[in-house]
Image: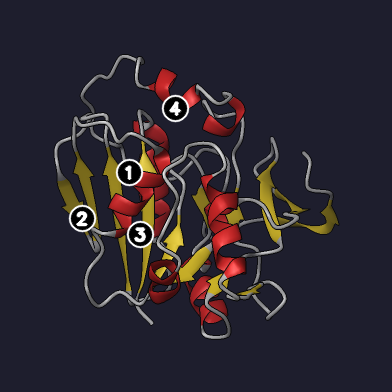
């Protein structure tokens, strides 16, 4: 199964470079990464199986931006994984998502990892949230019409569309996979914490031309991660 990691980015060059590094380390061979920037911050560029497309035209909503990013993937891609520009993904992330998508049209992991000060990773229950770890078969997303044209809550609105269409999800963790999604709240602004007007206000930020520096993140060892035992509640 060829799977595309699809990322919408905005004014996070350092974090984006770390996320691209996560993609370079993936063990799933049939893969690509599409990054869509609508701040006009970068030159269009590409690397090994990844492309960064940058435009100065701001999308009216995050849902529309996500749909535009999905439209950029190659024709032979069968599945789509949501990757966030300020989070991290362990090397088996795309393999785990692809395995779940062989069982169901939608992958939604039950565990998320939270980095600690020493670089270790604590496991938390997702409670069905944490959109940055989800994945879909391409046909499933097409069947429900993609993301609605909204900002905050576009993930749960999409989940509602999938559920109403009778498309069940599979948990890659329950099917023997290890947790793979590292959620890094606290390293920058988060739209989900900015209120209903956050997406518009982000457009007022100053944009400086940059190139994402592709590098390993500080402290967290992506190739030999220390995942702590025990499952903690969703809230950090």
Q: Residue furthest bottom?
A: 103
* Marks 2 and 3 in Cβ contact (< 8 Å): yes
Of the numbered discs 3 and 1, the one sitting upstream in the chain is 3
Residue 6 visible (yes or no): yes
| Sequence-earlier tag: 4 or 3 | 3
Rendered view: 200 above or below 15: above
Question: Which is more N-terminal, label 4 or label 2?
Answer: 2
Dot 3: within a 10 Å radius of its alpha carbon, few (fewer than 14), some, or many (20 or more) residues?
A: some
- x, y percent for residue 202: 41, 22
Q: Are marks 1 and 2 in contact (CB under 8 Å)?
A: yes
- Looking at the image, residue 118 lies above or below residue 93: above
- Whether residues under marks 3 and 1 lie with C-beta atoms below 8 angstroms apart, the answer is yes
**Numbered badge on residue 214:** 1
For the image, the number of numbered tags is 4
Q: Is residue 74 left or right of residue 108?
A: left
Q: CA distance from mark 1 to mark 2?
A: 11 Å
Residue 55, position as x, y percentages in the image: 18, 36
The disc placed on residue 47 is 2
Please give the label number shown on residue 24. Answer: 3
Q: What is the CA distance from the residue labelled 2 to the residue labelled 3?
A: 9 Å
**Residues under labels 4 and 1: Cα distance?**
26 Å
User: How far apart are the alpha carbons under marks 3 and 1?
Assistant: 10 Å
Nearer to us of marks 4 and 3 is: 4
Real-space CA distance between mark 2 and mark 4, rounded to the nearest whole angstrom: 29 Å
């Amino acid at each position: 199964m060829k799977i595309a990691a699809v990322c919408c980015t905005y004014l996070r060059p350092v974090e984006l470079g770390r996320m691209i590094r996560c993609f370079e380390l993936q063990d799933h061979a049939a893969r690509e990464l599409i990054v869509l920037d609508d701040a006009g911050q970068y030159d269009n560029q590409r690397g090994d199986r990844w492309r960064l497309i940058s435009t100065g035209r701001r999308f009216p909503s995050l849902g529309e931006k996500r749909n535009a990013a999905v439209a950029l993937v190659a024709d032979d891609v069968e599945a789509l994984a949501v990757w966030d520009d300020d989070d991290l993904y362990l090397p088996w992330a795309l393999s785990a998502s692809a395995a779940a998508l062989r069982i169901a049209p939608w992958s939604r992991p039950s565990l998320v990892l939270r980095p600690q000060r020493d670089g270790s990773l604590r496991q938390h229950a997702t409670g069905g949230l944490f959109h940055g770890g989800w994945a879909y078969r391409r046909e499933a997303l097409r069947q429900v019409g993609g993301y609605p044209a909204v900002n905050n809550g576009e993930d749960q609105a999409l989940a509602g569309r999938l559920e109403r269409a009778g498309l069940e999800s599979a948990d890659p963790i329950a099917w023997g996979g290890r947790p793979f999604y590292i959620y890094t709240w606290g390293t920058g602004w988060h739209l989900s914490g900015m209120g209903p007007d956050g997406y518009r206000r982000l457009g007022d930020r100053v944009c400086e031309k940059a190139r994402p520096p592709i590098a390993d993140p500080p402290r967290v060892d992506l190739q030999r991660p220390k995942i702590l035992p025990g499952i903690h509640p969703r809230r950090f």
